[in-house]
Image: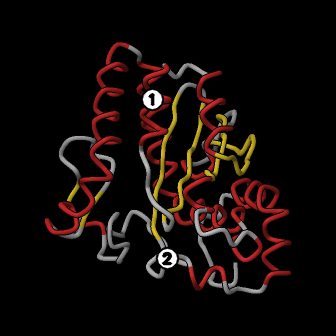
Amino acid sequence: MPSSADIDSCNFCLVKHGRANLRQCSKCKRVRYCSKECQTKAWPTHKKSCRATVALLESLSTDPDGVALNAALSRWISIWRPVLMKFAVAGLNLPNNTAEDRLATHIVVIEIERRPHPPSHAKFFKLRHGAIMTNDEWAEAMARSLATPEQVEDWRRDQRGNDTVRIVVACEDLLRFLFFSFRDGGRSEREKDREVAQQLGKFWVTALRMKIDSGDFAMADSE
C-alpha cells in the first residue's frame, strides 16, 4: 500500500513534507508538489485533469452555488484522500482478483451527497453509494449522466496502466478523478491474506460510510 497522500504530502511522490513546503499547481490550484522535478514527472498524467479543472472553474464563474459546491468538494477530498485511497484498495480486493490488468479494467466509484447543516468541513458530505465498476460499466454510467460523448471517449483513452488505482468521486454534476500508483506494482497488496481481503472487499462500502459519518479521517495502520 502506498503512503497516504494528504494535504501535507506531495501529490506525486506521496512523501510528507508539510503543507508550507509544497508548491501548488498554478493553473488548477488543486494539487501540490514538493519539487519542480515531481511536478514535471506528474504533468503527463495531471495535464488532462488540470485543464478540465480550469475549464470547470471558468464555467462555474456565473454559478455561485456551483462555485461553493466545487470549493467544498475540493476541501473534503483533500481531508479524506488517504481514507478514500485505502478503502478503494480494499474494494478492489486484489488478493482474490489477481488478473494483472485488474486496476486497468476496473474503477472505484464513490458517490457522495451534501449533508444537511454539516457541523464541519470533514462532515460536509455523506456517502450515498460505492461500487467497483468495469471500464464499460463506468462509461455507460457517464453516458447516462451529463457527460458528452467526447468526455466519455476522453476517459476511455486515458489509460493509466496496470499499477494505478483509479477513483472517481461523484457529487451532483461534479466528477473528481483520483489516481495513485503502487510502488511495487501492487505485488505486496496481492500477497495479503485472501480471507481477510475477501471480507474487506465485501464490506468496504459499509465500513467507508461509517468512517465518513464519524468524521474521523485519521487512518491507523491497522485500518
Query: What's under tag 1, amino acid-wise?
Result: Ala
Instruction: Give the percent coordinates (x, y) of residue 151.
Output: 45, 27
Instruction: Give the percent coordinates (x, y) of residue 142.
Output: 59, 29
Camera-nearest residue between 56 and 20? 56
Left or right: 19 as drawn, with respect to 77? left
Element type at mark 2: loop
Instruction: Give the percent coordinates (x, y) of residue 173.
Output: 55, 25
- In the image, residue 58 above or below residue 185: above
- In the image, residue 107 above or below residue 202: above
Residue at the image position 49 percent from the left and 72 percent from the top: 4
**Given this view, does label 1 or label 2 mark the residue nearer the observer?**
2
Q: Name the residue under label 1.
A: 68
N-term-proximal mark, 1 vs 2: 1
Camera-nearest residue between 117 and 221? 221
Query: What's under tag 2, amino acid-wise?
Result: Gly
Mark linked to residue 185: 2
Badge 1, how many Cα within 10 Å: few under 14, some, many 20+?
A: few
Element type at mark 1: helix
